[in-house]
Image (cartoon, helix red, strand yellow):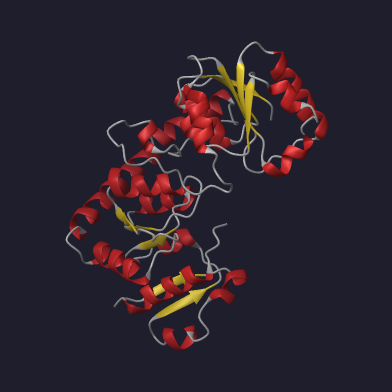
Amino acid sequence: MAQLEVVQVEELFLGLKRYNDKFLWVVNESEQTKLPRDFKEGLSNKGLIVSWCPQLEFLAHKAIGCFVTHCGWNSTLEALSLGVPMVALPQWSDQSTNAKYIMDFWRIGVKALADEIRIVRWKVIEGCIKEVMQGERREEIKRNTLKWRELAIEAVAKGGSSDRNIVSIFMSKLLSLKTIGPTISSMYLYKKIQDDKEYGLTMYKLDTDSCMKWSNEQPNEFVIYVSFGSTTQLQVVQVEELFLGLTQCNDMYLWVVKELEQTKLPRDFKEGLSDKGLVVSWCPQLEVLAHKAIECFVIHCGWSSTLEALSLGVPMVALP
């Protein structure tokens, strides 16, 4: 699903081409128009570009030295389980958090830092690959990848933790259970890390100042937080019913209504607000959910939002 900007594709190509080792690069057919015009000349005997490949087979192959990855959870788990060092280029969603785990918790790779316009330059990419493949940390990273690979093998072996869990799930017929991976920005769960407030990319412009200033003025556990995620669109009648339900409650509310959805609000909604609540177009959800003023979360039950509220101990009213 990750789609890179043209300039990022060009920088990645340069970084790979300038490094000494060969590369295998998966570029979806729809993305290949972003490659430099002369990329075939730059390839020569240096690398191979394909539209898709059997990733597990390649990660398990003896020729693979490292994995330049967007840090999607599946890809991260596959490389972790197969003992492949990683260079992390996270793009959005939980990927920045996964990159944090790769570099600082599991210590099986490095994160390539983007510049002020969110582009990772070729020199950074080349430097990160060198760090993993031949740098001072190479031996430490290799030891850690082997350690996690062994732990993964133990987990899926007969009697291992994954094996036992699968058996117990089928025995109890709880086939709807889902595994949980790390998707919460670590500063909210692991207080020793205070520099990891970022949580990937956001699709909308944040209204942080008004959200947090208003929340700071409210009593503890007195605010109903309402948000339906990045893509959910409610019918007009549902927006009206939700507005009526909130205004009839005694508590205050903070309601995220995307700009494109605000035309669905009742005409007199501002009068209904008065000192009762605040409607914003977007907000920093993790900061809001972690705030002492939040009493409950009216939620569409998207997995990320559900896991955030669960991890931060916020009761939920589910409107899937």
Q: Quadrant of the C terminus?
A: top right
Residue 303 is drawn in which quadrant? top right
Q: Work out whether residue 180 or residue 273 is closer to the camera in this orientation and state it.
A: 273
Residue 296 is drawn in which quadrant? top right
Measuring 42% from the left and 36% from the top, which residue is drawn there?
162
- Point out residue 308 in the picture as x, y percentages from the top left corner: 50, 31
Measuring 27% from the left and 33% from the top, which residue is drawn there?
192
Q: Work out whether residue 243 or residue 1 is closer to the camera in this orientation and state it.
A: 243
Q: Work out whether residue 204 or residue 89 is closer to the camera in this orientation and state it.
A: 204
Residue 159 visible to the viewer: no
- Point out residue 52 in the picture as x, y percentages from the top left corner: 55, 67
- Point out residue 145 in the picture as x, y percentages from the top left corner: 28, 52
In this rendering, would 299 be left or right of 307? right
Give the residue at the far left of this rendering.
136
Measuring 43% from the left and 75% from the top, which residue is drawn there?
13
Measuring 60% from the left and 17% from the top, which residue is drawn there?
252
Q: Quadrant of the N terminus?
A: bottom right
Give the residue at the far top of this rendering.
250
Residue 151 is drawn in which quadrant? top left
Residue 119 visible to the viewer: yes
Q: Work out whether residue 200 or residue 150 is closer to the camera in this orientation and state it.
A: 200
How many numbered marks have been drawn onto this rendered protein structure? 0
